[in-house]
């Protein structure tokens, strides 16, 4: 079963972290050298800038603000983005998830804010009403964060994978619009725009293909710089705004007047923030997948608290609701630079840009086609992360097919035809006016319908030793029977079932599985090693008879006796030739000698014999170099 697979992989990672006396620093917490830190931070700012200023531009145009007011909104937005990003990545107490997540103004809030502003009369009067709603919605988000985080059990891979994929796919049209000249002057037939966009994309790809190390990690920045330089001879780089802008522009609290509070506006903004919480959850889980750090309810709660604080601060400092910016999640995946301090550095640069309008004008000079070419690479990688998450979903269960298919279908429908929201009531348009929120709501709702309601809720099966055990039966079992039934999921004796029973009763199999995983991850290293040591002998399974023990499992099936022969045939191990068997034996023996416990490989995931051997080689890092001679 899938539980066994994730447990073995995560447990071995946890064991390596906890038992290493040197206590190595996780890549997320490492601080790069100052030079690289600065370059990586600037790269995040450049990748982020276009998306950051879109919301104030759209809002200012819609509610009738003048150019000077728009410039102040942009400066305030960047300044607050910087503070919010530092809060999220560095953290203060139980605020901030401490992952490489940049904060930006959520696109979900654009339509509701325009509606609120126009209803209040437009101009600065509309703006102050928006800020009143933003301040209250931020406070509600902060207070509701731990309660929302407890709903994480309703976000299995079938939901999170769909949401992450939807985020990536729904952002691609934004990149495409930039690639053809931007929303204000799109020109799809202009070969110059197409050449700059595709040329920027090609530069990013070629740098990542030809270079390693530092140069590969700044591929996006190099693409933006080279693309901008290539656009100069064609007159697409306008630096006039740099000369016209001031050197210093400080945003002051309540610059446009004291906030006004409207019940209808506040309720609308609270709905926006609850929808945004779904996006934040998806971004946090996606980033955890990318940087190889397990994300739990506490992490989601800290991220949502940071969203709430940043949103309230935005209302005070003349900005807007904040959330984790999916655009920069794609940049983390593309560059594989996972340090949260890089995002903190980007936050510092954004604060400076927000205080120096000339710097903001210089960054804004990057042509739209160049930004679009870079965004195509970044946004697509977000979708790839979602696809990787969906690879863990059992699509033999047709319910999962319906959840993913419907979520993606509705999301792309709304993304391609955004005007369909006009056919809905105003309150529904807030929820379904964005492809990201529409697809997310559909995926979450269908998962609840199929897996958490009706008769299926109490009858979700847990397989153990070939039996089918319902959650209802386990809920009624005493500690002894519970431990006896659940103990058959493990290859050896363990106290985990007893600790899981103390946390019950459980209403569904998802909650039970989550409790088992939590107890396994929290078990002492000695107990984890003992459990791994009981896995069956993969060497014996392939029939070499002379290799050190290595372990195998296939959905909870014990590989002993007749079951071993069946599993050997099903996994393709019977096709291993003599050389492959000998190599697998050597790898298994070296692994046990190196780590003190057997090599554990999920045969179902490994696939063919080549993939099995590749997995074994990857899991066995090269030995440390010998000490120098005396």
Image (tube, rainbow, N blue to C red):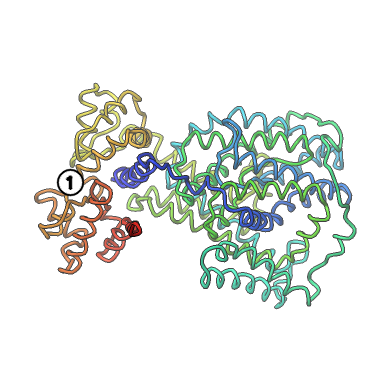
Q: Which residue is mark 1?
A: 558
Q: Residue at x 46, y 43 (%)?
A: 446
Label 1 element class: loop
Residue 518 position (above or below residue 240): above
Residue 474: x %, y % from top left? 27, 28
Q: Nearer the viewer, residue 213 or 441?
A: 213
In the rendered image, the quadrant that contains the N terminus is: top left
Which quadrant would residue 129 be assigned to in this image? Answer: top right
Query: Please, which residue is most extreme toward the front here?
Result: 630
| Residue 350: image location, x then y, percent | 72, 49
Tell me: 433 left or right of 534.
right
* Residue 189 in the figure: left or right of residue 70: left
Q: Position of residue 307 (x, y in %)?
A: 63, 38
In this rendered view, identify the residue nearer to me: 6 or 212.
212
Q: Answer few, some or many: residues within 10 Å of disc 1's Cα (few below 14, many 20 plus, some between 14 and 19).
A: many
Residue at 60% in and 72% down? 203
Q: Quadrant of residue 77?
A: top right
Residue at image location 34% in from the left, 25% down from the top:
504
- Going by the image, does 621 lie left or right of 596? right
Q: Is residue 209 above or below residue 504?
A: below
Whole-percent x, y for residue 405 in the image: 46, 54
The part of the image, by quadrant, that contains residue 624 is bottom left
- Looking at the rendered image, the quarter that the C terminus falls into is bottom left
């Amino acid at each position: 079963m899938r539980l066994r697979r994730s447990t073995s992989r995560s447990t071995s990672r946890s064991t390596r972290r906890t038992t290493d006396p040197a206590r190595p620093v996780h890549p997320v917490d490492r601080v790069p050298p100052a030079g690289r830190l600065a370059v990586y931070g600037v790269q995040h700012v450049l990748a982020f800038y276009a998306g950051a200023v879109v919301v104030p531009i759209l809002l200012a145009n819609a509610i009738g603000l003048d150019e000077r007011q728009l410039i102040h909104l942009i400066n305030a937005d960047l300044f607050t983005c910087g503070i919010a990003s530092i809060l999220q990545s560095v953290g203060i107490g139980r605020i901030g998830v401490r992952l490489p997540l940049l904060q930006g103004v959520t696109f979900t809030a654009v339509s509701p804010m325009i509606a609120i502003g126009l209803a209040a009369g437009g101009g600065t009067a509309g703006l102050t009403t928006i800020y009143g709603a933003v301040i209250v919605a931020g406070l509600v988000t902060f207070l509701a964060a731990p309660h929302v985080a407890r709903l994480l059990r309703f976000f299995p891979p079938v939901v999170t994978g769909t949401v992450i994929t939807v985020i990536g796919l729904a952002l691609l049209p934004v990149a495409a619009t930039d690639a053809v000249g931007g929303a204000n002057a799109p020109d799809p037939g202009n070969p110059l725009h197409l050449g700059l966009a595709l040329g920027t994309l090609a530069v990013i790809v070629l740098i990542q293909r030809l270079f390693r190390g530092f140069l590969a990690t700044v591929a996006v920045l190099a693409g933006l710089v080279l693309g901008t330089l290539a656009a100069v001879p064609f007159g697409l780089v306008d630096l006039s705004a740099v000369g016209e802008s001031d050197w210093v522009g400080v945003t002051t609290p309540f610059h446009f007047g004291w906030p006004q509070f409207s019940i209808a506006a506040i309720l609308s903004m609270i709905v926006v923030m609850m929808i945004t919480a779904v996006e934040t959850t998806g971004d946090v889980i996606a980033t955890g997948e990318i940087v190889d750090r397990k994300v739990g309810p506490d992490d989601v709660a800290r991220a949502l608290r940071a969203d709430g604080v940043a949103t309230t601060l935005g209302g005070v400092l003349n900005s807007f609701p904040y959330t984790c910016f999916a655009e920069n999640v794609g940049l983390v995946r593309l560059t594989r630079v996972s340090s949260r301090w890089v995002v903190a550095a980007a936050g510092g640069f954004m604060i400076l840009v927000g205080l120096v309008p000339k710097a903001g004008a210089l960054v804004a000079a990057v042509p739209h086609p160049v930004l679009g070419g870079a965004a195509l690479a970044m946004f697509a990688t977000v979708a790839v992360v979602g696809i990787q998450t969906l690879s863990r979903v059992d699509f033999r269960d047709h319910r999962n097919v319906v959840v993913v298919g419907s979520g993606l279908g509705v999301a792309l429908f709304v993304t391609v035809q955004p005007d369909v929201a006009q056919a809905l009531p105003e309150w529904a348009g807030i929820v379904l006016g964005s492809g990201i929120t529409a697809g997310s709501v559909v995926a979450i709702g269908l998962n609840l319908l199929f897996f958490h309601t009706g008769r299926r809720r109490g009858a979700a099966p847990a397989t153990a030793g070939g039996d089918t055990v319902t959650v209802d039966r386990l809920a009624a079992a005493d500690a002894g029977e519970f431990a006896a039934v659940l103990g058959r999921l493990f290859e050896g004796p363990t106290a985990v079932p007893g600790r899981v029973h103390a946390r019950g009763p459980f209403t569904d199999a998802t909650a039970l599985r989550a409790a088992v995983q939590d107890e396994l991850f929290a078990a002492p290293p000695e107990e984890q090693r003992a459990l791994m040591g009981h896995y069956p002998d993969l060497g014996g399974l392939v029939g070499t008879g002379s290799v050190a023990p290595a372990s195998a499992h296939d959905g909870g099936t014990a590989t002993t006796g007749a079951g071993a022969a069946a599993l050997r045939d099903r996994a393709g191990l019977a096709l291993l030739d003599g050389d492959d068997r000998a190599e697998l034996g050597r790898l298994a023996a070296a692994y046990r000698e190196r780590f003190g416990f057997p090599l554990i490989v999920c045969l179902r995931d490994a696939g063919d014999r080549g993939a099995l051997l590749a997995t074994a080689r990857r899991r066995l890092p090269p030995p440390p170099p010998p000490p120098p001679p005396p």
